[in-house]
Image: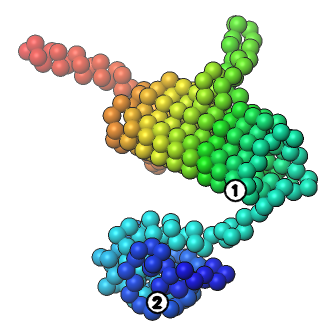
Amino acid sequence: MNQDARTLTLADIAERLGARLTGDGERRVSGLATLRDATPNQVAFLANRAYLKDLPDTRAAAVLLAPAHGEACPVACLELDNPYLGYAELSRLFDPLVGRTPSGTHPTAVVADDVRLGDNVAIGPQAVIEAGVTLDDDVVIGAGCVVGADSCIGSGSRLHANVTVCHGVVIGARAILHSGCVIGGDGFGFAHDGGRWHKIAQLGGVVLGDDVEIGSCSSIDRGALGDTVIGDDVKIDSQVQIAHNVQIGDHSALAGCVGIAGSTRVGKHCMLGGGVGLSGHLTIADGVQVTGMSLVTNSLLEPGIYSSGTGAMDNAQWRRNAVRFKQLDDIARRLSRLEKVGRGG
């Protein structure tokens, strides 16, 4: 593939994506944009029918879209059955971090004498790598990161600036940890004697699988006894809290501000919308989707889509409904009595 300063020909893109190209294959492009904002040197994409209205007026060099929309496209087409997946692939080709991976250890980094380093490891300014750590090949440790004692980070993983990995954490290959996240802090474990709280030592660790990505300022607590376990290809957004001994199955995704209480097990291929809360000691089956701002207090043992809570409404209407919520138990009891009378009649 010809690539010069992240410029590509449309033929290059079609070959890389396995797309059917209609238009000038030699035309060069240098970036991606939306249908509305794209310039003549950029590629746009159409993956949601809601944006069909923007297709006739696009100024993009080409549009990545499904075959059904090709005839309506006024510029060159890159046709794929799954254009959103193609967009994901194409976005990585224009990623400014590609080809700019640092190497070597910055002179201000503090690295313990017994740390085991693979090939092409990069350790940034002011990073601290404690005793007994293993960093496999092609690991990148950003500026200001701390990797605690006896932790292991798999090949090709990248920690952005100011990530904290506490002691005894295992991170798989090709993980991406964004700035400010904390992996392996103490779980929220305390015993109460009736007057004050007594800390319970958190003796477990955290295990992250391969291809895990964790957003900025998210926290995954270490286990109280066993490990907190995050499966392969799990994607975790920013400001997510995962408590001690939680287990999350492979290929699940958690949107921003999800909170999961201790010892809950989430299955494979689950999706939790923004702001979802899961109570502790629950079991969530494989293939469960929970919509945003829902509170789950009981196990969900069958796959499907689950919701709770109420949507936003006019305040005056909400106040009336809030009063009625308090009356529901009494209404249900009265209705039950009426049903019994009806059956007796």
Q: Position of residue 31 (x, y in %)?
A: 59, 79
Q: What kind of residue is marked 2?
A: Gly
Q: From the viewer's side, name the closer residue of 168 and 74.
A: 168
Point 43% across, 40% down: residue: 268
Circle count = 2
Q: What kind of residue is marked 1?
A: Asp
Number of residues whose C-alpha sits closer than 10 Å to that of mark 1, classed few (under 14), some (14–19) or many (20 or more): many
Dividing the image into 4 quarters, which one contains the N terminus?
bottom right
Q: In the figure, 176 relative to 300: above or below?
A: below
Observer-side mark, 1 or 2, equals 1
Q: From the viewer's side, name the closer residue of 303 and 135.
A: 135
Q: In the figure, 256 relative to 203: above or below?
A: below
Q: Is residue 79 left or right of residue 118?
A: left
**Circle 2 — which element?**
loop
Q: Is residue 49 left or right of residue 34?
A: left
Q: From the viewer's side, name the closer residue of 71 and 201.
A: 201
Dividing the image into 4 quarters, which one contains the C terminus?
top left
Residue at the disc numbered 2: 25
- Residue sticking out furthest to the top: 194
Q: Is residue 209 left or right of residue 306?
A: right
Answer yes or no: is residue 285 visible.
Answer: yes
Separation of marks 1 and 2 at Cα, in angstroms: 35 Å
When asked about the image quadrant of residue 24, the answer is bottom left
Q: Position of residue 28 (x, y in %)?
A: 55, 88
Point 61% across, 28% down: residue: 227
**Circle 1 — which element?**
loop
Tag shown at residue 138:
1
Point 58% across, 72% down: residue: 93
